[in-house]
């Protein structure tokens, strides 16, 4: 059984997709042992509580440096014997200690087809605003391992979503979440928990 620690910062719809896919047995070999929010009062924590999942707030604001925040997160994950960290709508930067200790064991969901519309400053609605501004006809979501480059780690799964002429950023975000994020994140976690993901030369190979 893989112990999963989920990092959140907001509404927690991606956390919910993981909870639902564990409860319906799609993900058989993974268990969420802790939900950690970087901010107080977010609905993601209520989602965890409703499903009797242990949660806590490790507020980024409570730490004066990224290094201290990094160590606090690492200590928490080790205390809970976490094997896999999932960043699900997590808006803080994870530091080098966590990334090193959890090399190719931190998964992030990003709401675009990386390498488009990603990196520093591209998060939440801003990603979809940039996609609409550029006029792309297809966008989507990417699940990738986290390394020291923002949204730069090995790509695990991507799923494309058509952009519609009358799309607003909010409408596009909702469609990307529904048609892509909430599907490929559980799929990637399932593959990881079943030991089907290998990384060779920084490229992901998924074993059938
Ligand atoms: C989503 O667009 C997700 O892709 C991004 O953060 C947004 C909110 O996610 N990482 P959630 O509803 O908090 O899971």
Image (spheres, rainbow, N blue to C red):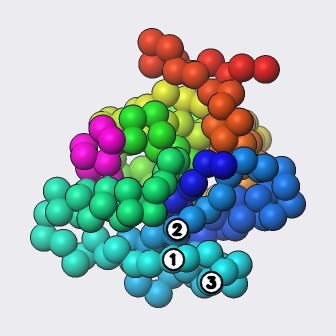
Q: Residue 69, image x and y in percent?
A: 24, 63
Q: Is mark 3 on a helix, strand or loop?
A: helix
Q: Which residue is drawn at 55% across and 29% down?
A: 155
- 65 vs 52, left or right, is left
Q: How crowded is mark 2: few (under 14 residues within 10 Å), some or many (20 or more)?
A: many
Query: In the rendered image, is residue 63 in sight?
Result: yes
Q: Which residue is drawn at 38% across and 56% down?
A: 78
Q: Is mark 3 in CB contact (under 8 Å) with mark 2?
A: no
Label 3, label 1: how far apart the Cα atoms are: 7 Å
Q: Is mark 3 within 8 Å of ligand 1?
A: no
Q: Residue at x 44, y 72 (%)?
A: 37
- 76 vs 118, left or right, is left
N-term mark: 3 or 1:
3
Q: Is mark 3 in CB contact (under 8 Å) with mark 1?
A: yes
Residue pointed to by mark 2: 34
Placement of 131 over or under 11, stated as above or below: above
Q: What element carries label 1?
A: strand
Residue pointed to by mark 3: 49
In magenta, the rendered stretch is 90-101
Foreground of the two, 103 or 178: 103
Label 2, label 1: how far apart the Cα atoms are: 5 Å
Residue pointed to by mark 1: 55
Q: Is mark 2 on a helix, strand or loop?
A: strand
């Amino acid at each position: 059984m893989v112990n999963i620690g989920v990092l959140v910062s907001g509404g927690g719809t991606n956390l919910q997709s993981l909870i639902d896919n564990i409860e319906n047995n799609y993900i058989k070999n993974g268990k969420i042992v802790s939900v950690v929010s970087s901010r107080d009062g977010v609905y993601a924590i209520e989602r965890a509580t409703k499903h009797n999942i242990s949660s806590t707030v490790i507020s980024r604001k409570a730490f004066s440096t990224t290094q201290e925040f990094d160590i606090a997160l690492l200590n928490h994950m080790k205390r809970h014997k976490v094997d896999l960290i999932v960043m699900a709508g997590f808006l803080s930067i994870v530091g080098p200690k966590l990334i090193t200790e959890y090399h190719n064991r931190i998964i992030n969901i990003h709401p675009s087809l990386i390498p488009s519309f990603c990196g520093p400053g591209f998060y939440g609605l801003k990603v979809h605003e940039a996609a609409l501004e550029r006029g792309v006809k297809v966008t989507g979501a990417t699940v990738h391992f986290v390394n020291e480059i923002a949204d730069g780690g090995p790509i695990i799964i991507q799923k494309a979503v058509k952009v519609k002429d009358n799309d607003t950023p909010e409408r596009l975000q909702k469609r990307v979440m529904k048609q892509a994020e909430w599907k490929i994140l559980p799929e990637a976690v399932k593959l990881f928990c079943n030991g089907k993901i290998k990384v060779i030369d920084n490229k992901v190979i998924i074993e059938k």
